[in-house]
Image (cartoon, rainbow, N blue to C red):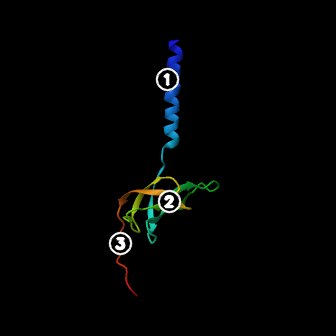
Amino acid sequence: MPDVKAKKENTAEKSENARNALQRRREIVGTVVSDKMQKTIVVKVDRRVRHGLYKKYVMRSRRFKAHDEKNEAKRGDLVSLIESRPLSREKRWVLQTVLRRGAQAPEANV
């Protein structure tokens, strides 16, 4: 009978590890391209992909909308996002940290 009990414990540990792996939230790093909305930023994430035919590395980018509760990220900042539940039609990410501040140029009224 001790074999059955040990087996149950092992399967419980495996299922718990599998559950944690499924629930792990993805993190991405990108640059803020827009902060004009209230509590929302648009982040551009670049990645390098090797071209299938020409074998040259090409930059591919994607834009994500993220929730920024305190409006702390500004345009040009390097930020880290974490995956969350759907907050709106397009927002599925939340600002985790601002990794590096971007160079802020003063806006001129022309």
Q: Quickly name the residue at label 1.
A: 9
Task: Say whether residue 61 is visible.
Answer: no
Dot 1 surroundings within 10 Å: few (below 14), some, or many (20 or more)?
Answer: few
Dot 2 surroundings within 10 Å: few (below 14), some, or many (20 or more)?
Answer: some
Disc 1 to disc 3: CB gap under 8 Å: no
- Relative to 106, is 2 above or below? above
- The C terminus lies in quadrant: bottom left
First in residue order: circle 1 vs circle 3:
1
Left or right: 26 in relation to 102: right
Nearest the camera: 66 or 1? 1
Disc 1 from disc 3: Cα separation: 56 Å
The location of residue 76, given as percent across then percent down, is 40, 67
Nearest the camera: 79 or 89? 89
Look at 35% across and 64% down and name the residue there: 101
* Residue 102 - label: none
Secondary structure at numbered mark 3: loop
- Relative to 76, is 106 above or below? below
Dot 3 surroundings within 10 Å: few (below 14), some, or many (20 or more)?
Answer: few
First in residue order: circle 3 vs circle 2:
2
Q: Amino acid at mark 2?
A: Asp
Secondary structure at numbered mark 2: strand
Nearest the camera: 40 or 59? 40
Q: Quickly name the residue at label 3.
A: 104
Look at 39% across and 67% down and name the residue there: 74
First in residue order: circle 1 vs circle 2:
1
> Furthest residue to the top?
1
* Residue 46 - label: 2
Disc 1 to disc 2: CB gap under 8 Å: no
Disc 3 from disc 2: Cα separation: 21 Å
Q: Amino acid at mark 1?
A: Glu
- Which one is closest to the eye, mark 1 or mark 3? 1
